[in-house]
Amino acid sequence: MKMAKKLICLTLVALLVLSLVACGKSTQQSSKESGKESEVENKTENEQKEDSKDSGKQETGSQAGKEKWEPQSDLSKHVTITLAAVQAQDGYDYTNGDGVAQYYSKKFNYTLEVTALTWSNWNERCRIWINSGDMPDVLVFNFTQTNYPEAAGYVEQGLLYKLPDDWKSRWPNVARVFEVTGLGPQMEKQFGGTYFLPRARFYKNMINEPGEPVPDHWSLYMRKDWAKAVNFPIKSTYKVSEILDFARLIKEKDPGNVGNKLIPISADPHAAVLMFIQSNSTHYNTFYKDPKDGQYKWGGASEDTLRGLKLMAQAYKEGLLDPDFITLKPEDSQAPFDTQGVAACNFNQAPTAAIHPNFINRFQANLGLDPFEHINMATVLGEDGYYHQRDLINFWGTIVFSPNIKKEVFERYMDILDYNATEEGRTTLFLGLKDVDWTYDQNGKIISLYDEKKEGRPLGGSNGKYPSLGYTLGAIVLFDDFAFNNPNHDPRCLEISRQLYKDRCEISTPETFTKTNWDLYTFDSPNMKRAQFDYDTELCNLVTMPGDIEENWKKWVDSKMPIIQPVLDELNAKLGSKK
């Protein structure tokens, strides 16, 4: 098993190094054709129909012949699509708001009505919409192992649309993405049909084969200059206790002269639970099969979970963890570090695609400091010295459809997804308009035409040239994959990401960084449905409530056992090894 992990890491490193070389050789070119930027012209209805027919004949750049795209809906007929997704911008016009939005709405002849969800309300809004039968046409659903029973219930009750049996032959590009997600084929087998379309993290740049553990992105952003000022070692990995040592030094010496605004460790509730508890307890919020005896156990009652809770309580009581962390929203958790400049470290998402914008567009833009001189990125380890995580699985977020969706709307959105699964579609989603913001060189390689300094604004984001750029316009492959070859990203960011993933593969064991147990993942029963808790809230409450943390934890475990024990009995009877 350890040899397999090393092979996986070597594959990852090789891919990243090749990507670095490719990025390093790409020359940034300022666009000489800015006057050719696409705009939606005032055309007659018949002219628009002809444009739509013509767009259906397109193939994809250098991949033409490999990723052919052909619409399965009548693009001459205008449709309105309602969509709800996290990461969308509230109130933005995703139909005509910018050149990329116009490109898609013209190409696919639609009006896109978007409801923007936040990290805080995402799960609850989806739950309300689906259960009430009032969901929009298209919804990005946060599918996880802990809410699998909930998802299974939606399928059983007919609350989600079942894709037609021939969908893979009609939309072959989506089908190819579907197969590499791991989750897609497993859920299709489980439910006897396709209800969920997982969005692949990695596709053309897979870091390992489906079924192998995929490293997560959560990382520690640390002020490198402050660490040097207090003589704290700069490393790519730290145990949780070492981070507390760093925070104590920062609190004592205040090297940034922040005063009473200083926050040694900034994290929202979910991030704090991951940093302190998951970093020590791989299965803190689920059941697991103990390799020692083959019996299923509950991670919430493990000593590893208690170890993480004690460290978190220690950080809170010493004033190292933001005293207001429990009220901090995920979408605001980065601000103390990279906007206000008052946090010594922040635990947050750091996928390959996010490091460049977080370094350049947030930290450097807001604080005016060189991020490569002032930020150290690190992986957080448990007190046992190992990295802890369950297989991320090669997806994030699944696309689901309303059971009441009109056939023409469903087919149109599938056409969009199928186009976005091609190289041209993926590149347009993430780099902007072809021959305006990017193009192919004579060897078929993607090169950038966008000069951010000359333009005076980033390519995407709320203040960018194309605020619509990204997931909202129908991504089926995520930024993570494209980031390996993004010519607009600083190669140093790719090197940082390479180190983070490399460490997670190497500094772990099969027991601390586990593969997916699909039997457990898909186990469903009334008892399992009842045993779903808001672990973030409940564990954070244990930390902030008065009293001894160990006593609080023991009482919490005892209070849960009447719900937990029936599940353990079922799991061990059906899936456990005989003693």
Image: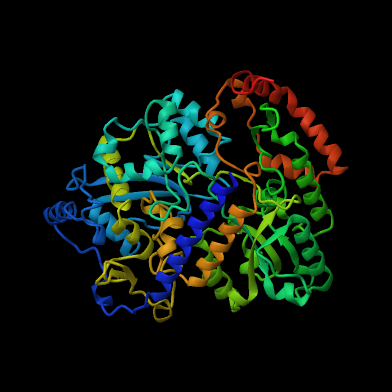
Residue 104 in the image, given as x and y percentages of width and height: 29, 56
Residue 79 in the image, given as x and y percentages of width and height: 26, 45
Query: Looking at the picture, does residue 491 appear above or below residue 199?
Result: below
Residue 496 in the image, given as x and y percentages of width and height: 56, 66
Find the residue positioned furthest to the front: 3
The picture quadrant where one finds residue 445 is bottom left
383 vs 364, left or right, is right
Between 224 and 127, the residue placed more toward the observer is: 224
Between 150 and 395, the residue placed more toward the observer is: 395
Q: Residue at x 42, y 46 (%)?
A: 199
Colouring mode (rainbow / by chain / secondary structure / one colour) = rainbow
548 vs 568, left or right, is right
Q: In which quarter of the image is the C terminus?
A: top right
In the rendered image, is residue 18 in sight?
A: yes
Find the residue positioned furthest to the right: 547
The picture quadrant where one finds residue 138 is top left
In the rendered image, is residue 488 in sight?
A: no
